[in-house]
Image (cartoon, rainbow, N blue to C red):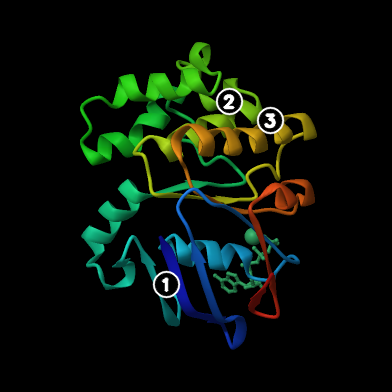
Amino acid sequence: MLKANNIQKSYNGLEVLKGIDLEIDKKEIVSIVGASGAGKSTLLHILGTLDTPDQGIVSLNGVEMSTLPQRKMSKFRNEEIGFIFQFHNLFPEFTALENVCIPAFIKGNADARSKANDLLDRLGLGDRAEHKPSQLSGGEQQRVSVARALINDPSIVFADEPSGNLDSASADELHQLFFDLRKEMGQTFVIVTHNMELAGMADRRLEIKDGLVTI
Ligand SMILES: Nc1ncnc2c1ncn2[C@@H]1O[C@H](COP(=O)(O)OP(=O)(O)OP(=O)(O)O)[C@@H](O)[C@H]1O
Ligand SMILES: [Mg+2]
């Protein structure tokens, strides 16, 4: 489903990624580990079209994303790719419900609100829909960002240290949620993590070392 070939990326002469090849199948949960500075976030951003490689190709469902013109790429990203970051990146002035709705509003989905409410219910946040992010716990904020990532039924969800900012109980709950959502919705996840327990739970654990992926 997702294919990356020969991904290379350098910053100021520093070769961060030296030719990464990988394939991720539908419904897989893949973890990416590696030392700080190894290039995990760089790779995740390139796979998710948030950054462009110096060399190489990324395709999702047979669409080579870098060849899309800017507007088509934005639309494709909004509809096919979900993101979860370490710091939830929710808009502070919007409620949980509004934050979840944003990608669906951009898509033009008339059912955005009812779908967002259903997702918040599913994630145990039905009674938090009208709260602003600052009125939610870290674990709740992160579950709102999971709902936002899922609202358009993306083909793949990328998470960059999603539990990096959570206490261990909230982290465990979030990790279990990824597996439950895979089971219920067939969702595919690629998760960068320093959490070895989560990395070990994944179907596959990829390690980035010296600019390449080792298994
Ligand atoms: N925009 C940038 N400009 C210059 N250098 C960058 C940029 N982004 C990343 N780098 C460098 O690329 C290398 C890889 O960074 P990256 O953020 O991908 O690491 P990481 O594996 O995600 O690390 P961490 O576990 O600390 O998040 C680092 O040496 C970093 O300093
Ligand atoms: Mg990183």
Nearer the observer: mark 3 or 1; the answer is 3
Q: Which quadrant of the figure contains the C terminus?
A: bottom right
As helix, strand or loop, the secondary structure at mark 3 comes to helix
Relative to residue 27, is residue 184 depicted above or below?
above
Q: Residues within 10 Å of mark 2 (few under 14, many from 20)?
A: few
- Seen from the viewer's position, the closer of residues 38 and 189 is 189
In the rendered image, residue 19, in percent from the top left (x then y), is placed at: 54, 83
As helix, strand or loop, the secondary structure at mark 2 comes to helix
Question: Could you tell me which residue is drawn at 43 percent across and 80 percent down?
Answer: 56
In the rendered image, residue 83, in percent from the top left (x then y), is placed at: 48, 48
Query: Disc 3 to disc 1, how far (Cα)?
Result: 33 Å
- Please name the residue that numbered disc 3 is placed on: 173
Question: Could you tell me which residue is drawn at 45 percent across and 15 percent down?
Answer: 130
In the rendered image, residue 97, in percent from the top left (x then y), is placed at: 41, 23
> Quadrant of the rendered structure where residue 167 is?
top right
- Seen from the viewer's position, the closer of residues 57 and 200 is 200
Q: Residues within 10 Å of mark 1 (few under 14, many from 20)?
A: some
- The disc labelled 3 sits on which kind of residue? Glu
Using residue 53 as the reference point, say whether residue 61 is left or right of it.
Answer: left
Q: Residues within 10 Å of mark 3 (few under 14, many from 20)?
A: few
- The disc labelled 1 sits on which kind of residue? Thr
Residue 95 visible to an observer of this rendering:
no
Relative to residue 135, is residue 205 depicted above or below?
below
Query: Which mark sits nearer the N-terminus, 3 or 2?
Result: 2
Q: Tag on residue 41?
A: none
Nearer the observer: mark 2 or 1; the answer is 1
- Please name the residue that numbered disc 2 is placed on: 134
In the rendered image, residue 152, in percent from the top left (x then y), is placed at: 34, 38
Query: Which mark sits nearer the N-terminus, 2 or 1?
Result: 1
Residue 30 visible to an observer of this rendering:
yes
Q: Tag on residue 52?
A: 1
